[in-house]
Image (spheres, rainbow, N blue to C red):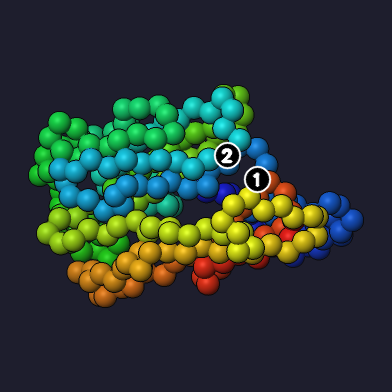
Amino acid sequence: MRRALIRPTVAGVLLAALSTGCAEEFDSRTLLTGYRVLGIAAEPPEAGPEARVRVTVADVNVAGATYRWSLCFFDLGALTGYRCADPALDVVLAGDGPSIVVDYGPMGLDLRALYDAYGPFPGADGRLRTFEDGIDLLLKLESGPPGGRRITTVKTLVVREGRPPNLNPVITGLTLDGDAGMTTAAPGDKVVLAVTLSADSVQTCDDAYRGERTESPVFTGTRPRGRWIPRSRSGSFAGRR
């Protein structure tokens, strides 16, 4: 989802500060009010050009929500609103629910035929990419309740062959204040959510143009009420309800 960028003058900033000094504070981005998309997961996150990939949106307050999925083989970037370079490369996907399967093979999108007809395409570094290097597809989801807030969410799907694919992390443990079951807390109490990943969840890969890269887990918390520390790399959250 993109937000409009406003560049106020200094006088405008001062005026805004004076006029809003006594107003109620804005809600934190981690507070879940109304329809919200938390993210999109792909399983597997990286696959070959004949694979089938399931994509699933994680959203909340979904009453009445509708979903429109599309995929672009080569987009022009954020400054254009992720517009496709050619209408022939912008495909509306089958399925109108929160989870769909994308078929890259000849019976589906037929990515190899599209690449032969329109490729090769440059990557983020400007170099032409092959399926062996890895090609980024842009998945776009437009979702939300009818007559309400509509959200556009984009996600990169990596298509690569010739090496072991990247995999999603596996959560082996999830506890709240050390308890794997339900835990209650009174307003003002501090609670700690701990996440344990499998030993092979953090992977190291050798990218053809960006060199060796090791993943770093990032955990983000949201909540219907209370306060949470929004981001942590230590495997746990702390917050007050």
Query: Disc 2 designates what residue?
Result: 60
Q: Is residue 87 visible?
A: no
Q: Is residue 70 left or right of residue 175?
A: left
Q: Residue 47's mark?
A: none
Question: Does dot 1 land on a helix, a strand or a loop?
Answer: loop
**The residue under label 1 is which amino acid type?**
Leu
Q: Residue at x 19, y 55 (%)?
A: 160
* Residue in view at x 84 percent, y 51 percent: 24
Assign the C terminus to one quadrant of the image.
bottom right
The number of numbered badges drawn on the structure is 2
Answer above or below: position of 58 versus 14: above
- Residue under label 1, please give it: 32
Residue at the (30%, 35%) spot, across then down: 101
**Residue type (three-letter) at the residue carrying disc 2:** Val
Residue 4: give x, y in percent of width and height.
58, 49
User: What residue is rendered at 27% in x and 59% in y?
Assistant: 166
Q: Choose between 199 and 40: the one closer to the eye.
A: 199
Does label 1 or label 2 sit earlier along the sequence? 1
Measured as percent of width and height from the top left, residue 105 is found at 15, 38
Q: Position of residue 144 (x, y in %)?
A: 54, 32
| Residue 74 placement (x, y as % from top left) | 27, 47
Most extreme residue toward the right is 22
Q: Out of 97 and 16, give the one closest to the viewer.
A: 97
